[in-house]
Amino acid sequence: DSKTTVLLDWLPSNHSTGSPGEHPWERGARLAGEIRARVGIPPGPLAKEKLEELLGAKLPLQKSPWVEQKHLRGGYRNVTEHGRTSLLVPSHRDTNQRFYLARLVGAALSTSADQHVLPVSNAATALQKIERSFAQELLCPWQDLDAFTDSKGTDDDAIAEAAEYFSVSDWLVRSTLVNRGKISRYRLP
């Protein structure tokens, strides 16, 4: 019933499924790199205007009023709505919306084109790991974050500056730095 929609018909329908032994988080990061190259996103942050252009929607989106009671969020590909995908919007915060929308794109890339439901959940599934790594790499590519923190450092102020620069949350920056071994796990709140 959601009136909030985005375009996902720009995504390739013949994306690769991955190689044997490829971990879900590796697949997500690889797919994000492929999409960035395919649609001409330059190194560095994904500009709000480019994300709006790709999704055919003006950000920020209005938060869905009924989303608080649901643990499963995501979108529904409407074949009759001119290629638009209806979605639930779980947050009004810009950085949360960007991450959520990037996860939705990752879900669309990781499912067949005839699968209408695009789940975005907190369940620890392979799909969730693909979505999260896809979103991180699409919005805040590791190579660029690594270079940014090489020049600015990894203290709390530098992490906040990186989060602002990439238009993502401090948590995304911290967890990426931890997962890549650049800072210690004790730095996570």
Image: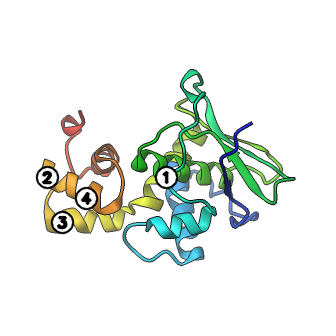
Q: In the rendered view, tell whether residue 50 sits above or below residue 158.
A: below
Callout 4, which amino acid?
A: Ala
Q: Which mark is residue 150?
A: 3
- Disc 2, SS: helix
Q: Residue 130 carries which label?
A: none
Q: In which quarter of the image is residue 58?
A: bottom right
- Disc 4, SS: helix
Callout 1, which amino acid?
A: Pro
Q: Nearer the viewer, residue 158 or 96?
A: 96
Mark 1 or mark 2, earlier in chain? 1
**Total of numbered circles in the picture?**
4
- In the rendered image, is residue 23 in sight? no
Callout 3, which amino acid?
A: Asp
Q: In the rendered view, tell whether residue 17 sits above or below residue 183.
A: below
Mark 2 or mark 4, earlier in chain? 2
- Mark 1 or 3: in front is 1
Residue marked by disc 1: 60
- Mark 3 or 4: in front is 4
Q: Residue 157 carries which label?
A: 2
Mark 3 or mark 4, earlier in chain? 3
Q: Residues under labels 1 and 2: Cα distance?
A: 26 Å
Q: Which of 54 and 16 is in front in this view?
A: 54
Q: Residues under labels 4 and 1: Cα distance?
A: 21 Å
Residue marked by disc 4: 162
Quadrant occupied by the C terminus = top left
- Mark 4 or 1: in front is 1
Q: Position of residue 74 (x, y in %)?
A: 63, 40
Q: Residues under labels 1 and 3: Cα distance?
A: 31 Å
Q: Residues within 10 Å of mark 4 (few under 14, many from 20)?
A: many
Callout 2, which amino acid?
A: Asp
Q: Residues under labels 3 and 4: Cα distance?
A: 11 Å
